[in-house]
Image (cartoon, coloured by chain):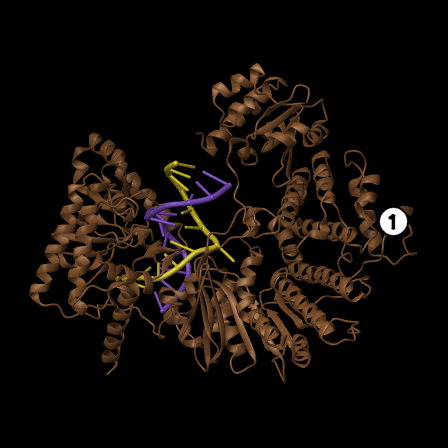
Chain colours: A brown, B yellow, C purple
Amino acid sequence: MMNPTEIADALDTVAKAKFDPVEFGYSFAQATDNAQATVAKLKAGTTNKSDIPGGVLLNAKFHYAPALPGAAAGMLEALRASRRSAKAKPAILIATDGEMIAAEHPKSGETLHCAFAELGTHFSFFLPAAGKERYRAAEENPVDIKATGKLAKLYDALLKANPDWATPERRHAMNLFMTRLIFCLFSEDVGVFKEDQFSFAVFSYGGNKGEHAHDALVQAFSAMNLPKGQREGLPAWTEKFEYVNGGLFADAIEAPAFDPISFRYLRDAAELDWKLINPDIFGSMIQSIADSKARAELGMHYTSVPNIMKVLGPLFLDDLDEALDKAWEKPAALKVQLHRLSRIRVFDPACGSGNFLVVAYRQMREREIRILTRLGELEDNPQNVMFSSVSLNQFYGIELTDFAAETAKLALFIAEYQANARFADVFGRMPALLPLRDGGQIKCGNALRLNWAEVCPAPVGDDEVYIAGNPPFLGDNSRTDEQNDDMDFVLSEHLEAHRRLDFVACWVFKAANYIRGRAAKSALVSTNSICQGQSVGALWPHLLTGGVEIGFAHTSFKWRNNASANAAVICVIVGLRNTSKDKKRLFQGEMEAGVANINAYLLDAPIIYVHAESRSLFELPYMEYGNKPTDGGHLILSGEERHALLSDYPEAGQFIKKFMGSDEVCNGRLRYCLWVPDSLAEDAARFPPIRTRFEQVAAFRSASKAAQTRPAAAYPHRFRQAQNWAKEHAILIPRVTSERRPYLPVDFVGADVISSDLNNVLYDAPDWCIALIASRLHLVWIATVCGKLKSDFRYSNTLGWNTFPVPKFTADQLEQLSASARRILKTRYQHYPETIAELYDPDDMPDDLRAVHRENDELLECMYVGRPFRNDTERLEKLFKLYAARVKQGTK
DNA sequence: GATCCGACATGTT
DNA sequence: AACATGTCGGATC
């Protein structure tokens, strides 16, 4: 089986070879992971099912046909139309003339037009031909996916043809161009324009290969910005376009130049049925097609519709549905709900291109139609409805970037159009759409500086306000000075250590303040770190106060949307409300539970905050941070580097020690480090390779941004933080490890090992510490109160070890635990050379190791409650109880 | 002086 | 491309 990289390489080789229309089909078959025998049979013609001259069709895999020069796209159409294609269902259609490639993935409708030489670059497109299906989120609308794909390709092709448009200064112009284009494609399909009016013009006047497309587009767009009859200087054909206005066409009208490839993609995009487009993510499409660098910028992370519904459902839509159910037979009660719809306001303080608002709007309009239809059934006289009672004015947003704010208005406009069309279907009337009016109350500004109540006035009377959205996440290492200032502005008066928090915490804090004591609720998508580790104690006591509580929550889920590269982050959704007797809902993946309480860790448990401690609350040995090199890697040696150094300078051995971080502990590796006492620094530097390393360390540290690192350039022979080392032995606990393991990794090493800061360390501590750390109880505690790296365990001495509740052990009990620890280590050694990672693989853990761990758990748990715990919930309950009792005692 | 975090970083299949 | 799993050093208190 070839892996994708190999396929990429193989395709690249094919692309570099001279094109031979006959051979290509076979080399393509070979490059896409088909056996020699298969290829031979294809060549012999016995398995080739193609009905196109010179074509090669391999069942279910691909259908290739050679094209005459310049006719690749046309040949692709022939492949698409082929009856044999229909029968053999090839995963990929590909036509080429040796210059250009035209290909299609029929299952998704995705197409590819590229130069022949780029075959290898686009290997991912051809993976289906090798039997590897590309993952697609099942819930998304396939038309959106197609449209996004086509627009992304158009976008990339345009930038390639117009390198000068790829600069940051031109990005706005490029995005604006794409917005206008999408607006026109949409409008001509839904009836805002006459059917196909726009694409007819572009393809009539754009030239055969797009050579005049630039001029035609500029003329069309310019016309849309001028009332009819005032279009002097523009060609006569532009007179037919409606006057659009509304800001969209007001700025300078520019267009990039088209080449044959980009023109081809434009045609693909125009051929889509934009009627079916889902405006929920309309704005995001424009943003998701931009390049990956830009995606990291503010607002480039759009929320998928399933995730938006995770927010809006429990926030207010589910409640609305319940009320509708109750009122279903009673016209008066239904009218109350109809009125309620007109009083609900939705406010997204980080609205980006308006996804949340659009989805909320559509959902509300849909419910309105349901009510009106039902009223029509219940009351004999049909409702004489002229207008919707849900107006775009009920939708509020704040967005920092002007472009996204404009897009949000446009997206709301499209949503309104679609909702009205549906409304007209049912009730027979629809208001005029052009020229554009502004849509929604979108404020372009900084949400952290604005007073939210001035953007979205506080609810009065029977108003209800729902705050929803997905603000940006930024850790303390990636914020700009300006963003830090914003954070200070919002939080510094109220919180201590606020700079430790994620940027998103500012939105959560402002949302809590906005809703407190008002007819309002909030629910924001956040990074899961705000409900973990240090953030919990720092932030949540200030949120869950003055009557605010968590009404619902989605626990950690992996971020995913349709963008081509997904952000790597784990999210939570926390719904805040004022104290209420209504049920609380806790969602974990697909599961939902009605619970008595939700605390800041998003657990069904009483509110408790575990704070960092500098010493153990339960008199456990002192656990330290490992030694931190901050050396740019220059004080660290691989086995080979050590060997090379020692073979040249055997006397240098006195300066080299074993060096272990978490990777070394878990995966049984070993590295070495230079470890030189201050008094011998000059001696060490006499060895040229060591001197060079010291110089590199000094250079690296001098160039650092960190105030603590630069002075350390003066002692390059030493770690930036040489914290401590063992006299006899040390217990190493990796600070980050996989969440899959049933027990935390922990290792016992001699005094010859220097631990890096990737471990926490107990120096010269008794063996029973290992029995504690390797227990299920400890894992459960660490998993709950410490932070995580994404979803992996992150061990902390201050938050985890120093707070870990233990009963008062007797000397005898400690001896038993030490013996148990030794049994665990011994059992591991019996499996040497298997590593900790291998031994603790949940699918592959040896039975004897499992057994000694179970014994260890039973032994330890009996010391807590006289019997083993039944499950992790019980373990956690006991631990929190002990912790709470200890903290209470401490405050006396 | 010590440590918590990462809209990740990087190797593997 | 999708997945698994822990580096590394800055920013913060």
Within the image, what quadrant is residue A467 found in?
bottom right
Q: Is residue A216 left or right of residue A108?
A: right
Within the image, what quadrant is residue A82 found in?
top right
Q: What residue type is labelled 1?
A: Thr
Within the image, what quadrant is residue A875 found in?
bottom left
A346 or A752, which is in the foreground?
A: A346
Q: Which residue is drawn at 32% across and 60% down?
A: A783
Mark 1, residue position: A238
Q: Which residue is drawn at 29% across and 65% down?
A: A799
Percent from the top left, x then y, of residue A321? 59, 71
Percent from the top left, x then y, of residue A300? 57, 55
Q: Residue at x 83, y 54 (%)?
A: A224
Residue A451 visible in this rendered orientation of the protein: no
Q: Furthest residue to the left?
A: A812
* For residue A355, above or below residue A315: above
A466 or A322, which is in the foreground?
A: A322
Q: Is residue A832 left or right of residue A521?
A: left
User: For numbered disc 1, what is the local secondary structure?
Assistant: helix
Query: Where the C terminus of chain A falls, by quadrant?
Result: bottom left
Query: Where the N terminus of chain A falls, by quadrant?
Result: top left
